[in-house]
Image (cartoon, helix red, strand yellow):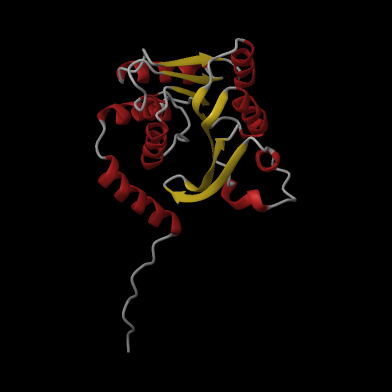
Amino acid sequence: MTQPTQPTQPTQQSTWDAVDAYFSEQLVGHDPVLEAATAAADAAGLPRIAVAPNQGKLLHLLALAQGARRILEVGTLGGYSTIWLARALPADGTLISLELDPEHAEVARGNLARAGLEKVAEVRLGRAADSLAVLVEQGEEPFDLVFIDADKPSNPEYFRRALQLTRPGSLIIVDNVVRGGAIADAASTDPAVVATRALHELIAAEPRVTATSVQTVGSKGYDGFTLARVQG
């Protein structure tokens, strides 16, 4: 007797993609500006590593909840997350985004201009470590929120500088900290994993912050982020 055909089980990634698509459709919706930013980044051949729409909305909501007037972003890419963050600012707010690659910076500036955000959002070109050092040396006014999403081996340095550029009550968000689960592997020799473990050891030993990390799955795969609040 022929057995009935069983429905094909979706893969984990296809399920994550479908769930992200559902939430994005329901809670983010059609956004021509963000879609144009993604298209411009694709046309320029930028890597498809920007945050997902629902993750961008999370950044936006955190900035709004924070009442942020000054935002610092480490790692611009094509400006997709920059747009989400800048939209949370008041008309007299400020966002400084740091980008190493000249082509990425050019695409991001174009996307910000098309979004009407060029008056509040600035892309600074150069090594983020150098740009952060300049901000510290210049005595830059503290930032209310810092989003770190750049080269992972430099995460500890970026976090140390973020502490110098924030105030009690500021939020620091570090993306891509789970590394597909490899963060739990103490024997890993992957520079991104080694540095991200060092970052969390730094945070754990730092009395000026309280923090947590959250694992995520979605259209960007299996990863997560760390959220820290500066205490004093």
Nearer to the camera, 67 or 3: 67
- Image coords of residue 172 (percent x, y): 54, 33
Residue 6 image-quadrant placement? bottom left
Nearer to the camera, 69 or 127: 69
- Image coords of residue 224 (percent x, y): 52, 46
Residue 1 image-quadrant placement? bottom left
Q: For the point 32% across and 85% down, which residue is it?
A: 2
Q: For the point 45% across and 34% down, which residue is it?
A: 50
In the rendered image, the quadrant that contains the C terminus is top right
- Image coords of residue 151 (percent x, y): 60, 30
Taking the view exactly as shown, the residue that stands out farthest to the top is 138
Residue 90 image-quadrant placement? top left
Relative vertical location of residue 28 with respect to residue 17 in this rendering, above or below: above
Left or right, 126 with respect to 64, comes to right
Q: For the point 38% across and 50% down, which residue is it?
A: 17
Q: For the point 64% across and 16% down, which residue is it?
A: 133
Left or right, 133 with respect to 228, comes to right
- Image coords of residue 220 (percent x, y): 46, 44
Left or right, 222 with respect to 201, comes to left
Nearer to the camera, 57 or 49: 57
